[in-house]
Structure formats: C-alpha cells, structure tokens
Image (cartoon, rainbow, N blue to C red):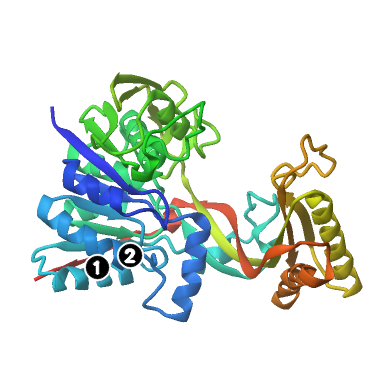
Amino acid sequence: MKKLRIGSGAGYAGDRLEPALVLMEKGEIDYIGFECLAERTIAIAQQEKLKNPDKGYNALLEMRMEKVLPLAYKNKVKVITNMGAANPDGAARVVAKMAEDMGLKGMKIASVSGDDVLGMLGKYQDTTVWETGEPLRNLDGEVVSANAYLGIEGIVEALANGADVIITGRVADPALFLAPLVHEFGWKTDSWDLLGKGTLIGHLLECGGQVTGGYYADPGRKDVPNLSELGFPIIEVDEAGEFIVTKVEGTGGLVTRDTCAEQMIYEIHDPENYLTPDVVADFSKVSFENTARDVVRATGASGSKKTETLKVSIGYRDCFTGEGEISYGGPGCYERAVLGGQIVEERLKLRQIPVDELRIEIIGVNALYRNQDRVLGQAPDEVRLRVAARTKKLSDAKKIGEEVETLYTNGPAGGGGATKSSAEIVSVASILISRDDVDVCVKYQEVK
C-alpha cells in the first residue's frame, strides 16, 4: 500500500528553521508544510501591502527559502506554505526569482489566492459578528482586511499541475497537509471520513514542535529531553488514512500519547465538530498508542459533510495600547511596586489622560490571575510593576509608559530596568460568508 511522509517545518511566523532543514535532509519526507499565518498576522500584512504592493508576505520568506529551496530540489521534497500572507502572488515571484538565481531549472512555483474578500463585505453588513453578537455594520473601527479561510481546492489544483512549491494566503491550517493526501491518494472531496482523518493529520502537524514536546514541558511532571534541539514532527500515512506520528531519530523532544493528545485538543473548542472548509471533523473517538519510542499510532478520526459557509477573519483598527514596566528588589519591594502603581494611576487622572481600560499589575503576583487581594506567602525578593492601558490616541498611549519611567526619580526607592512601549492594535472579528462568494485562483511560474 502506498505511503506518504509529511513533515512540519514551522508552527508560527517566526519559528526556528533548523528543525525543518533536518527533516528535509534526514527525514525521508515527501512533503513539508510551513504554517506561518496567525489571524492577526494577515491583517498586519495587509497594511504592509498597502504601503508597498510588492510586500505583505512573511518577513522571513527569503531567509527560509534560501535554505529550503536547494534541499527541496535535491531531495524532491514538495513545499507548501501560507507565507504568502496578504500577497501570495508577490511571494511566489520572489521565490521564483530565488530559484532562478540558484539554477534550480524546472522548479515550478504556484500561488493560491482568492481569500481576500474585503471588497465584498458590503453585502454582509447585517451579518452577526461572532465576538460581539452585533451586526458587522456596528463594528467600532476601520476595517483593514477580510480574509476567508480557504480549503484544499487551490493547493490540490497546483499539485495536479506539477507545482513543487505552493504559496498560499489564508487557508485553513490543516489544509496545508490534507491537500497532498487528497492529491497523492486520489481521495474524493466528499469522502468525509478520509478527510476527517487527514484533518487530524494536519491538525497534529500544523503547530510544528508542539506535538514533539514543545509547549508541553513541565519539569518534574512532564520532562522533555533536549528542547534546545527540538525535532519537528513527521507523519507517515497510507491510502486508508492510517498513520503514525514520529520525528527524526536523535533530535530533541519526544513523541508520546500525551504530546499527541495535547496537540489534538489545542484550539478546537468542540472535538466532535471541528469545522474546517473541507470537512466537519470528529476527533471525539480518537485514541493514541505508543508503538515504539517516539512513534505513536492514531486511530478513530472521522468526518461529515462540510458546511455551506466559510469563516472570514476581519482585521480592524481597534485602539492603541501603551505600557511601562519597572522592577523593585529587596525588602519591601512588593509594597514599593504597589505604591508605584498607585502613583501612576493618580498621575493619569491629574493629567486627564483618557483611557478606555487600565491594568496595574505586579508580575509574579497578580499579572495572570488578577487577584488584587492575593495574600503573599513568603515575601518576594523581587517584583516588576506593569502598567498598561488602552486609548483612542497614540499620543495618549505613549504617556502611559512615560509616567512609569518617571518613577525612577519621582517614585518609590530602588526602581530600575524601566521599559516603555506603545502600539496600534489591529483586532480580529469573525463572520461567516457563503463559500459561493469565494473564487480561488492559482498562478504558476517555472524556472527555465
């Protein structure tokens, strides 16, 4: 029975490159996927494209492809990635030029677009926004991007036409890994159980090292060896959708029932109805079994008919944030940090700086759990005060950190290591649109 080996080369935009190169050199893989596109990332990329039409793709595209393209060419590994972000066509042109300069004759690069649906939001103004429960027309902020989650369609088309490197914009993360299975095994796009199994494969791979021990370690409870050289995952799958999860022997990390189970339930909300553009996957009956060291077999995934709608992530200018931090150490450091926060809060009132939300927290005491009345056990040796606020103007946001910084000479004793920052916040809203409103486009460039 035919088998396929697929590796994961990245789990986020700034991920390490070395594990991907190890996979391509030693993993005996047929495909590698680089998942590099968070929801907010594409909104920011759209803004970059507005400033420069040639930009808007992942900032590390050239750095990655400089190392990846020669290995892909030499070892016949096909590359699929969403590093195109807001400009997959532009990214493909860059990669094609790099391949040409490297002399990689015959390499075919494809771009998949069609996810940008900003121009059609007018017809969806009465559609309910998930996060607010109100119509889209009531969204408080300038909309800067709108991208539908595409499925496997464009990637499968590109593979059928011989593409070696495929660069997409917004597609569902599992689609990067499901598409080669559909292409190689000839799965029908209404074979729901097979697509459900393939979606589990994609979901396990999409976050890179998370399934091999990254984002998992808890010393003394869940120990992971050699995280500094964490190996990224490989999944070996057959035509029936049966598969194992593993990694390159000798790399850091581990593959166990638990690492796989934790990744499976990551970001899916309802394991019985995991909605994707290609299938409604059911992970509720999945089981994992260690069959050898760093080898796990998964069974039990299934699927049902896909929905008639696609999710759209809308990026909009929400607010500005300003923040400042300063550290205190030694006896009484907690009390001094509390006093510092009180001083900043009073200063903001005296200067009549308007804030929509203000947070004053002591990192290590109440920054995560917000319990302002928490009783300390043993007095800490050091603490760090953080003050952050949401504002409508950047000028007001900057004043937050400025006031924290003035605690150096105008606040409690012994403050040091002050930092300050401010930024515009592009938030994300979600709606559903008809999949019939989305047209997928695939373009090709071949190195002569």
Q: Nearer the viewer, mark 1 or mark 2?
A: 2
Q: Amino acid at mark 2?
A: Leu
Q: Where is 247 relative to 125, above or below?
A: above
All told, the count of numbered labels is 2
Residue 414 visible to an observer of this rendering: yes
Q: Is residue 412 left or right of residue 278?
A: right
| Image quarter of residue 443 | bottom left
Where residue 316 sits: x, y (%)?
A: 60, 65
Residue 61: assigned label: 2
Residue plotted at (21% across, 63% down) = 109
Q: Amino acid at mark 1?
A: Val
Q: Are marks 1 and 2 in contact (CB under 8 Å)?
A: yes
Residue situated in front as seen by the camera: 187 or 272: 272
Where residue 387 sits: x, y (%)?
A: 75, 60
Residue plotted at (89% across, 65% down) = 346
Where residue 172 sits: x, y (%)?
A: 41, 48
Residue 95: assigned label: 1
Residue 397: assigned label: none
Residue plotted at (72% across, 51% down) = 383
Where residue 9 sits: x, y (%)?
A: 31, 49
Helix, strand, or loop for circle 1? helix
Q: Is residue 276 left or right of residue 418?
A: left
Instruction: Give the mark, 1 or 2, whose residue is nearer the N terminus.
Output: 2
Q: Is residue 11 left or right of residue 1?
A: right
**How would you rate the neighbour count of disc 2 (Cα within 10 Å): few for under 14, some for 14-19, many for 20 or more?**
some
**How would you rate the neighbour count of disc 1 (Cα within 10 Å): few for under 14, some for 14-19, many for 20 or more?**
many
Residue 279 visible to an observer of this rendering: no
- Tell me the CA gap for discs 1 and 2: 8 Å
Q: Is residue 272 left or right of residue 212?
A: right
